[in-house]
């Protein structure tokens, strides 16, 4: 496993496990499989309705709490609702603290939302706070108004939307670029890319593993999701090879600056 260092000094695994669209009844098994495979960073959200099952899987795994990095996301807007939401999420997940809580997407009163996150961080309920789906303009508004620099901005990032402009902006501002939906093109589309097919053969890895290696080697925190234990293990098995600079460049050429979902539309300002 490789690690990234957040602006708080905290080391975080560059590869984590996503849980969007995993139904509550399947979440405990999926997260348990991920922890068994070696993942130590788990991404959930209030919106996913599976914070409780993520918490259960982590408790049952009997790992030291300090060795697991747990992210959740505020689906609230404004100070009061977010303050209550943080406490509710802690109760739901059965945790004393989250390692990271991020604003799920910019909506309404983002400044009030961030103020509640910052206050909860000072109270020890959140170790780090950050953003998701914030474009440059929206991130600058946070930077201008708060002393706490967001630890991450979690944004749609994959082969066809590599977000190089956002990456440069975030890196220059000491914010880690985190990728959501890193595999959204699906295995078939990826296998059709000659560059990936060639690298897949050379390294004896699947095209998906090549993409995950590419993203993480670019210092992007990446959180693929799967409910299939074989996929969960394969996605983690990307730390025994390294792409050359030339190969990294070849993969960069595949960028289409194209969102797969077109959401939130404000992100298009930076493409
Ligand atoms: N902040 C946000 O607004 C936001 C938005 C979207 C997502 N996210 C986060 O980012 C995480 C990842 O994004 P995502 O869940 O949208 O999608 P993803 O991780 O890009 O792709 C998941 C899909 O890929 C398949 N897959 C995974 N590994 C595979 C493998 N080795 N071989 C073949 N197929 C494979 C999965 O199917 P199987 O289950 O069958 O393997 C699933 O259908 C989410 O779970 C969530 O935590 C955040």
Image (spheres, rainbow, N blue to C red):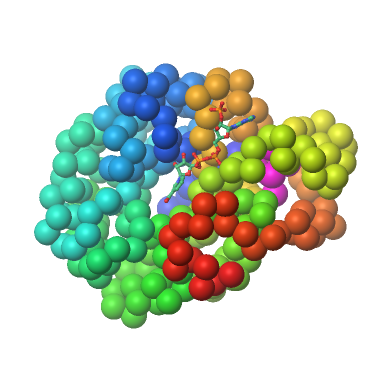
Q: Is residue 70 in view from this perspective? A: no
Instruction: Say whether residue 200 is left or right of residue 96.
Output: right
Q: Is residue 232 in view from this perspective? A: yes
Residue span colored magenta = 208-214
Tell me if residue 187 comes above or below residue 24 in the rendering.
below
Q: Quadrant of the C terminus?
A: bottom right
Place of residue 195 in the rendered image (x, y in percent of width and height, measured from the top left): 84, 47
Instruction: Say whether residue 85 is left or right of residue 213.
Output: left
Instruction: Say whether residue 110 is left or right of residue 246.
Output: left
Q: Nearer the viewer, residue 189 or 4?
A: 189
- Main SS, magenta residues: helix
Q: Nearer the viewer, residue 265 or 174?
A: 265
Q: Quadrant of the N terminus?
A: top right
User: How many discs appear?
Assistant: 0
Tell me if residue 22 comes above or below residue 258 in the rendering.
above
Tell me if residue 169 comes above or below residue 228 in the rendering.
below
Q: Residue at x 37, y 68 (%)?
A: 149
Hey, which residue is sitting farthest bottom in the picture?
Answer: 144
Place of residue 255 in the rendered image (x, y in percent of width and height, measured from the top left): 71, 59
Place of residue 59 in the rendered image (x, y in percent of width and height, measured from the top left): 31, 24
Rendering quarter of residue 146: bottom left
Q: Residue at x 82, y 31 (%)?
A: 204
Q: Residue at x 51, y 49 (%)?
A: 180
Q: Residue at x 29, y 78 (%)?
A: 145
Residue 201 counted in the magenta span: no
Place of residue 114 in the rendered image (x, y in percent of width and height, measured from the top left): 26, 64
């Amino acid at each position: 496993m490789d690690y990234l260092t957040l602006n708080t000094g905290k080391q975080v695994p560059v590869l984590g496990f996503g849980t969007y669209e995993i139904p509550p009844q399947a979440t405990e098994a999926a997260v348990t499989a991920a922890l068994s495979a070696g993942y130590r960073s788990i991404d959930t959200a209030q919106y996913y309705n599976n914070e409780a099952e993520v918490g259960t899987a982590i408790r049952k795994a009997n790992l030291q709490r300090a060795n697991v990095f747990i992210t959740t996301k505020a689906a609230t807007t404004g100070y009061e609702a977010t303050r209550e939401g943080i406490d509710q999420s802690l109760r739901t997940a059965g945790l004393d603290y989250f390692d990271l809580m991020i604003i799920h997407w910019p909506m309404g009163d983002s400044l009030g939302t961030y103020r509640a996150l910052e206050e909860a961080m000072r109270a020890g309920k959140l170790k780090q706070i950050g953003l998701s789906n914030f474009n440059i303009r929206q991130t600058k508004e946070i930077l201008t108004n708060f002393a706490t620099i967001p630890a991450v901005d979690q944004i749609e990032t994959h082969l066809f939307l590599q977000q190089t402009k956002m990456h440069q902006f975030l890196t220059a501002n000491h914010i880690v670029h985190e990728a959501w939906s890193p595999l959204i093109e699906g295995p078939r589309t990826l296998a059709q890319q000659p560059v990936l097919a060639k690298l897949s053969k050379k390294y004896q890895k699947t095209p998906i593993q090549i993409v995950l290696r590419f993203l993480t080697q670019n210092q992007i925190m990446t959180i693929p999701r799967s409910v299939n234990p074989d996929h969960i293990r394969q996605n983690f098995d990307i730390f025994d090879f390294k792409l050359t600079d030339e190969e990294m460049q070849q993969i960069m050429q595949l960028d289409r600056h194209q969102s797969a979902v077109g959401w939130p539309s404000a992100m298009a300002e930076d493409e």
